[in-house]
Image (cartoon, helix red, strand yellow):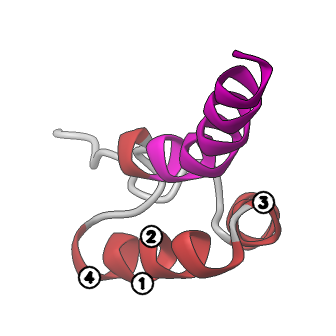
């Protein structure tokens, strides 16, 4: 039983960065796919790089006159 709980925790820790990038509005399209691939390969290091490199407000709406 303890092994199953441990494996669930490890799997959740690996999947969490992927879910964060998929649900993020910082990137779109192929850029998001690239970051997703990086996060799948490097997990938490990729997520840290994602948050430090990609600007928070990437796509601003244009004001209509």
First of labels 3, 4 by sequence position:
4
Q: Quadrant of the C terminus?
A: top left
Choose mark 2 or mark 4, whichever is in front.
2
Measuring from the top left, give residue 59's x and y in whole percent: 39, 56
Seen at 50% across and 53% down, the residue is 18
Q: Which span is picked out in magenta?
A: 1-21
**Magenta-colored stretch includes residue 5:** yes
The label nearer to you, 3 versus 1, is: 3
Residue annotated with mark 3? 44
Whole-number angstrom distance, CA of label 3 to CA of label 2: 12 Å
* Callout 2 touching callout 1 (CB < 8 Å): yes
Q: Which is more toward the observer, 41 or 27?
A: 41
- Cβ–Cβ below 8 Å for labels 4 and 1? yes
Q: Which residue is mark 1?
A: 34
Q: Which residue is mark 2?
A: 36
Q: Which residue is mark 4?
A: 30
Distance from disc 3 to disc 1, alpha carbons, whole Å, reads 15 Å
Quarter in which the N terminus is drawn: top right
Most frequent secondary structure within the magenta stretch: helix
């Amino acid at each position: 039983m303890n092994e199953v709980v441990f494996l669930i925790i490890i799997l959740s820790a690996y999947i969490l960065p992927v879910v964060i990038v998929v649900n993020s509005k910082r990137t779109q399209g192929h850029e998001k796919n690239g970051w997703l691939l990086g996060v799948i390969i490097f997990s938490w290091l990729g997520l840290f790089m994602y948050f430090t490199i990609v600007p928070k407000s990437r796509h601003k709406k244009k004001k209509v006159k």
